[in-house]
Image: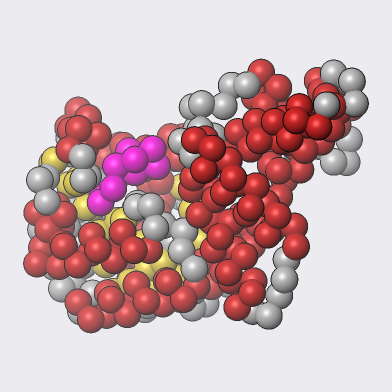
Amino acid sequence: MSTRDNGPAGQGRPVVAVLGIGTMGDAMARNIAAAGLGLRVWNRRREPAEALAEVGAVVCDTAAEACRGAKVVLTVLANERIVAEVVEQAREGIDRDAVLLQCCTVSPEGSRRLAAQAAALGVAYVEAPLLGSKEPAVAGTLTILAAASDMCAGERVQPVLDAVGTRTVWLDGISQPSSLKLAYNAWVLTTVEGIAEALSLADGLGVDPRQLINVINGSALDSTYVQSKGPKMISDDLDTPSFPLEAAAKDAGLIADAARGAGLRLGIVEVVRDRLQLAASSGLGRADVAATYRTSRQAVVSTN
């Protein structure tokens, strides 16, 4: 494993095709354009992609069209199945000397399957899940966990990684970044659920939840997540997502499945998965992950 703190982008300035213009894709595409890299974009719904014309992007009607002439094909899509489908749709436009730079959170096995798909197309593959949500994506301060099918592929995508993040952690083999991302997200999701339940407990016991945030502040248990997500839970400012709850529920399922596949049973993770799936099925999927607090509050209210 190696860690690179990004400096100025290298001399190579590849044309980049960004496939998938959601919250993360839009922010990353804008930072790629700001870095002076050529930019071609595609999204299933054209409207989000059209907004990037203002930063000089070529807006394309198909994934294959977006990939024509691009040396890096960056996928910022919802899950492994959609990535595989879109890459297949794009195959006629992907140059054989291009690199597929895959940023979706998938299972380790899923990343190996996508690497095999890239190999079947005759293109190099870089696995690069992201640490960070909307705010660091907009600021260009993401941390990227990365592994490449060959060293040359990693060097070729580095200008793109430099444009969207401030730190790239290179790992030794395909599937390791996805494994590390799932372990990281296990901590993120259990932290969010822990905050939600602690605040619900305080409220249920007749204590102002804001007092809990106050006593945690500055203690050994304090964190940026406590101080950012906690107040949003209390004020119910949860409908504009930094990390959508439906994506968190998907990741929680991947984490639980990966753990079982490794012979582990992570009880807390499985409870968090069930709680997030309940929240998503209750119509909170497009809210922020912190909206799991609403489910906790409902449980408290129902017992009063």
Asked if the stretch drawn in magenta spans residue 281, the answer is no
Left/right of residue 246 with respect to residue 296 in the rendered view: left
Tell me the residue at 69%/42% (across/down).
Answer: 192
In this rendering, the answer to whether 239 lies above or below 112 is: above
Q: Can residue 119 be seen here?
A: yes
In this rendering, the answer to whether 33 lies above or below 253 is: above
Which coloring applies here? Answer: secondary structure
Q: Judge by depth and name the residue closer to the eye, 50 or 194.
A: 194
* Residue 92: image location, x then y, percent: 9, 67
- Quadrant of the rendering where the C terminus is positioned: top right
Q: Quadrant of residue 203?
A: top right
Q: Can residue 169 be seen here?
A: no
* Residue 103: image location, x then y, percent: 40, 57
Left/right of residue 250 with respect to residue 61 in the rendered view: right
Tell me the residue at 27%/80% (across/down).
Answer: 119
- Quadrant of the rendering where the N terminus is positioned: bottom right
Left/right of residue 55 with respect to residue 111 in the rendered view: left
Left/right of residue 149 with respect to residue 226 in the rendered view: left
Asked if the stretch drawn in magenta spans residue 22, the answer is yes
- Magenta residues, start to end: 18-26
Tell me the residue at 85%/18% (across/down).
Answer: 208
* Residue 132: image location, x then y, percent: 53, 45
